[in-house]
Image (cartoon, grey):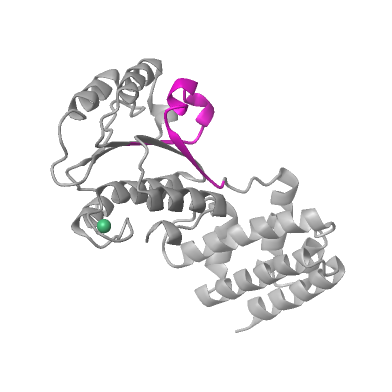
Amino acid sequence: MNFSEFDCSDALKNQLNAMEKSRRMPHAVLVTGGSESTRRELSTLLSSWAVCVSEGEKPCMECSGCRKSVSKNHVDIYYAKGTGKTDGIAVEEIRRITKDTALSPNEAPRKVYVLFDADKRMGKESMNAFLKTLEEPSQDILFILTAENIKAVPETILSRCATLTLESHFEASEDIREAVEEIVKGLTASSELMLLKALAALSSRQQALDILTLLRLVLVDALSLSVGSRALSEEQLSSPLAQKFTKSKIIRLIDVTSDAINKINRNVSLVLISTWLCGEYRRITWQM
Ligand SMILES: [Zn+2]
């Protein structure tokens, strides 16, 4: 996967492609927004980009540099280890990193230092020590920081990093969550009435969009569970679906939910959409 194939907003994609086309790499990037797993995914992509030895578009994901980066055993990529229960990155480790930046890379065009969860793992002292390193950058270095809470990163560090923002998780209100819970019950119940009643919550366009967006996330998680991997965020809501339905049924439920979202965006009447959706859900879930 290269930057163009990475699943992110158009704005971020343009930023990444511009970086790649100009071949001008910042000394430090801060990856924020999204989920922990997408932040780590983008970090790996960026490390691969820095150590890629392909002549063409980078990261190629095929050369020895990219492969070692993905399997996390590239000699020129260092992951801050942290210590203790909180896995905190101590000042001593930052000082070791600073010393190491003076040494040339072993095989890659540049060295990479990855500091995951800098907002949680770096205290004031470590941040100050790190700032000194950032102020005197060496040509062959890329620092990659990830942070859920960008506000916990000092302004002085932020101003020296290129910030890459992933789209944040969909934040549903308690009402929306309850409505989705009812629909999940309706989908897994044997009576049609429960599903019909639950779908009555699609009462305004915004409400319907929020409900179906969360429901789709729940269904995608149910799909992950049904193929034996982990649910990303909605385990509680998604596990009854994963237990009750086969993988192919869940895929069809996701498709129908996506269709309904498209219909709402095309201004089809909500009554028509609810009736249609109820029929489609029933057809999928009750079929043998
Ligand atoms: Zn490569």
Please state the horizontal and vertical placement of residue 282, each as a whole percent of the image. Answer: 71, 76
Q: Residue at x 39, y 49 (%)?
A: 22
Q: Residue at x 29, y 29 (%)?
A: 82
Quadrant in the picture for the N terminus: bottom left
User: Magenta segment: does it hold 86?
Assistant: no
Quadrant in the picture for the C terminus: bottom right
Foreground of the two, 19 or 275: 19
User: Magenta segment: does it hold 146?
Assistant: yes
Foreground of the two, 161 or 41: 161
Judged from the image, the quadrant occupied by ligand 1 is: bottom left
Q: Which residue range is magenta in the image?
A: 143-167
Please state the horizontal and vertical placement of residue 98, each as a whole percent of the image. Answer: 24, 24
Please state the horizontal and vertical placement of residue 7, each as a whole percent of the image. Answer: 49, 58
Image: 251 above or below 136: below
Q: Residue at x 18, y 28 (%)?
A: 102
Image: 169 above or below 199: above
Please state the horizontal and vertical placement of residue 193, each as a whole percent of the image. Answer: 80, 69
Q: Residue at x 24, y 19 (%)?
A: 92
In the displayed structure image, the side of residue 271 where residue 216 appears, left or right: left
